[in-house]
Amino acid sequence: MTSRAATLDRTPGPERRPDGFDVEVFFDGDCPLCLREIRLLRRLDRRGRIRFSDIAAAGFDAGEVGVPWQALMDRIHGRMPDGTLLEGVEVFRRLYAAVGFGPLVAVTRLPGLSHLLDLAYRVFAKNRLKLTGRCLDGRCEVHAGGAGAGRSPAGAPGAQR
């Protein structure tokens, strides 16, 4: 008979995660609001459970993720250690659960609140560039590889909204 302690001892803990993280987040490092939240998460992530990947960084390759760069720009994406891709509010749930907010995350799964959060995020994501001051003369445009920092690779797709 296996004791409870022996079972718990074999369960991978934070120090023994085979991939070294609980969730990877793909974020726009040229987005001021996005960066504010990423900085908060980095401070809260004392156990190194989150892998942070800046999609605006020079050298970022969306092909390695398996998601088009434009899709990564349109909605937040995450990846689990087993390769499962996540997007939208579920990414935030996984991020905040990884830093110890599990009980609060559980509340966000309640049917009415879950739908409201999904709707609110869709509205935000659609208007993110405008809301973060990244539009000029009514035109919102960004380029793969961090065009805001002058790092746009030749032929990179532009994002217009």
Image: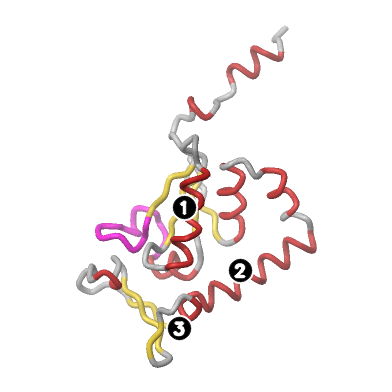
Look at the numbered disc 3 and give the secondary structure of its residue.
loop
**Which residue is depicted at the point 71% across and 14% down?**
4
**Mark 2 → mark 3, Cα distance in angstroms:** 16 Å
Measure the alpha-carbon separation of dots 3 and 1. Answer: 23 Å
Picture residue at 54% right of the left edge, 59% below the top: 87
Q: Main secondary structure of the magenta part?
A: loop
Labels 2 and 3: the sequence-earlier one: 2
Quarter the N terminus occupies: top right
Q: Residue at x 65, y 71 (%)?
A: 120
Residue wearing tag 2: 121
Q: Position of residue 112 (x, y in %)?
A: 79, 63
* Residue 161, disc: 3
Q: Secondary structure at mark 2?
A: helix
Give neighbour class at mark 3: few <14, some 14-19, many 20+ (Cα, 10 Å).
some
Which residue was labeled with disc 1? 25
Q: Nearer the viewer, residue 58 or 79?
A: 58
Residue furthest bottom as drawn: 137
Looking at the rendered structure, the kind of residue marked 2 is Tyr
Q: Is residue 123 above or below residue 4?
A: below
First along the sequence among labels 2 and 1: 1
